[in-house]
Amino acid sequence: MHLKVSITTLFLFVFCYVNGQNNDRKPMGTPEEMATETLGKIEEEVELTNDQRKGVYDIHVAFFTDAQEAMKQRDKEKMEELETVRNERVKELLGKKLYRKYITVMESSKPQRPSGGRPGGRGGMRGGPGM
């Protein structure tokens, strides 16, 4: 009897642990949906003309299309490259003044990561290096 309870408890613990790993991430939408959401955030702070609105939307659709593949491959360098290209294209479209506002909006909407790396990694929650 105690063995069944122990096994059931262990199974339940493992199940809860595995399911709790990525619950804080919402599923990604299509590039068009993500571009629309991003454009909405930008337009709260930056006044755009119709041409600028369309240009920013198109730039972000292209960015999110390429970014989905880079994220699947966990290619951090490719993501940084894509962000740089996107930002250069937006800067060219908006000009310096509006671009500064754009960057402020984009930085404030980025998910905040804890400083010091991933928790639980080497020297993380266990108390020190090599433990």
Image (cartoon, rainbow, N blue to C red):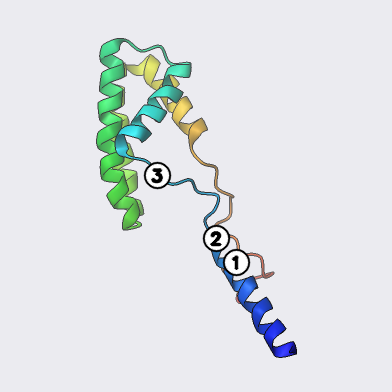
Residue in view at x 27 percent, y 19 percent: 54
Q: In which quarter of the view is residue 75 placed?
A: bottom left
Which sits earlier in the primary sequence, circle 3 or circle 2?
Answer: 2
Residue 64 relative to residue 114: left or right? left
Above or below: residue 31 compared with residue 97: below
The C terminus, quarter of image: bottom right
Q: Residue 98 location in percent, x, y?
A: 38, 16
| Residue at mark 2 to residue at mark 1: CA–CA distance | 7 Å
- Rendered image: mark on residue 17: 1
- Residue under label 3: 28
| Mark 3, secondary structure of its residue | loop
- Residue under label 2: 21
Please tell me how crowded label 2 is: few (under 14), some (14-19), or many (20+) other residues with Cα within 10 Å: few
Q: Residue 52 location in percent, x, y?
A: 29, 16
Name the foreground residue: 26 vs 57: 26
Residue in view at x 66 percent, y 70 percent: 128
Amino acid type, label 3: Met
Q: Residue 120 location in percent, x, y?
A: 60, 65
The N terminus, quarter of image: bottom right
